[in-house]
Image (spheres, rainbow, N blue to C red):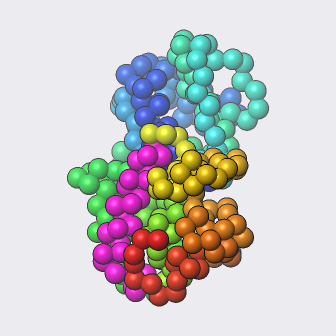
């Protein structure tokens, strides 16, 4: 499932390509067709993202709410849109550009009231401004500090924290030397502040670069004289999908387990049980 930086990149791309334009809206697959008819010819005025949710705003009509889920993908192309092939849930087009959405978990036309309701059910998003809806880390800390659930599970709970997926979860806990099995209520405030700050930096870099890199300069392939990582995900990481490989910091084999129905990766040396911080 795409992580939060992907949705913020998409919001920026839709805004850059279609913002202020009267657009053609259609649903070749069919399920979104009634809403597409209402939007066709309208102006796309703004876009927004919160966690793994994308919102496309249309003047005097409402917002398209998109959640890509596990299989959703967006393709943006130049030139007149080609004849639709396959299952295209939503197509937005002008004479110069088009964007096709396939396989989303959610694609619905909602009101501004409904959009706010969706966002209020979500945890804070490290990529949103601190003075806007969803950018304040305090609500997440309040929930985490009272919970007996593991910090690994809490970071993946979109009601606690928005936009963080399996990669950012594993990597930020490694970077901060935190045992993923630590109950949330045993996390210190200093640890939480460090996790939030690190997520802000890592996810902003993800928006800028289009992929996830989490290793510090001293652990890059060039600095360590090692081969670059080969993985369809791309980017250099410490523990994600590196099960049984040597930790880049201490050499201990990286461990993995199924945790809250997702694969968890960590280094048992750099993230010892009940640790209270310290970067590896």
- Report whether 161 appears left or right of 78: left
Give 1 or 82, whichever is nearer the viewer. Answer: 1
Residue 78 belongs to the span the image colors magenta: no
Q: Is residue 67 visible?
A: no
Image location (x, y in percent) of residue 280: 47, 71
Which residue does the image show at 67% across and 50% down from the upper left? 227
**Is 37 drawn above or below residue 195 in the view shown?**
above
Image location (x, y in percent) of residue 117: 38, 56
Give 264 or 125, whichever is nearer the viewer. Answer: 264
Which residues are the magenta region? 183-207
Give 113 or 258, whichever is nearer the viewer. Answer: 258
Which residue does the image show at 61% across and 52% down from the upper left? 225
**Is 200 drawn above or below residue 63 in the view shown?**
below
Which residue does the image show at 70% across and 66% down from the upper left? 245
Image location (x, y in percent) of residue 83: 72, 18
Residue 191 belongs to the span the image colors magenta: yes
Which residue does the image show at 47% across and 66% down from the upper left? 175
Q: Is residue 274 visible?
A: yes
Give 254 or 170, whichever is nearer the viewer. Answer: 254
Image location (x, y in percent) of residue 98: 57, 22
**Is 11 drawn above or below residue 127 in the view shown?**
above
- Report whether 130 appears left or right of 127: left
**Is 165 drawn above or below residue 47 in the view shown?**
below
């Amino acid at each position: 499932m795409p992580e939060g930086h992907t949705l913020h990149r998409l919001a920026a791309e839709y805004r850059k390509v279609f913002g202020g334009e009267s657009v053609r809206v259609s649903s070749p697959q069919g399920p979104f067709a009634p809403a597409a008819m209402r939007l066709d010819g309208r102006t796309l005025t703004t876009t927004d993202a919160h966690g793994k949710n994308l919102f496309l705003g249309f003047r005097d009509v409402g917002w398209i709410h998109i959640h890509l889920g596990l299989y959703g993908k967006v393709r943006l192309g130049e030139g007149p849109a080609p004849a639709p092939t396959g299952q295209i849930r939503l197509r937005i087009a002008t004479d110069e550009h088009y964007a096709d959405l396939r396989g989303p978990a959610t694609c619905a036309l909602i009101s501004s009231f409904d959009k706010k309701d969706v966002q209020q059910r979500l945890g804070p998003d490290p990529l949103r401004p601190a003075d806007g809806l969803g950018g304040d880390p305090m609500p997440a800390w309040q929930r985490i500090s009272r919970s007996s659930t593991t910090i690994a599970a809490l970071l993946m709970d979109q009601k606690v924290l928005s936009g963080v997926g399996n990669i950012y979860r594993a990597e930020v806990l490694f970077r901060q030397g935190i045992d993923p099995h630590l109950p949330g209520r045993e996390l210190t405030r200093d640890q939480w502040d460090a996790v939030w700050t690190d997520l802000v930096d890592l996810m902003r870099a993800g928006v800028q670069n289009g992929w996830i890199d989490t290793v510090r300069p001293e652990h890059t392939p060039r600095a360590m004289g090692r081969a670059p990582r080969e993985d369809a995900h791309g980017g250099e990481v410490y523990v994600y999908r590196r099960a049984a490989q040597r930790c880049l910091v201490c050499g201990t084999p990286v461990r993995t387990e199924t945790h809250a129905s997702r694969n968890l990766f960590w280094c048992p040396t750099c993230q010892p049980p009940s640790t209270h911080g310290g970067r590896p």
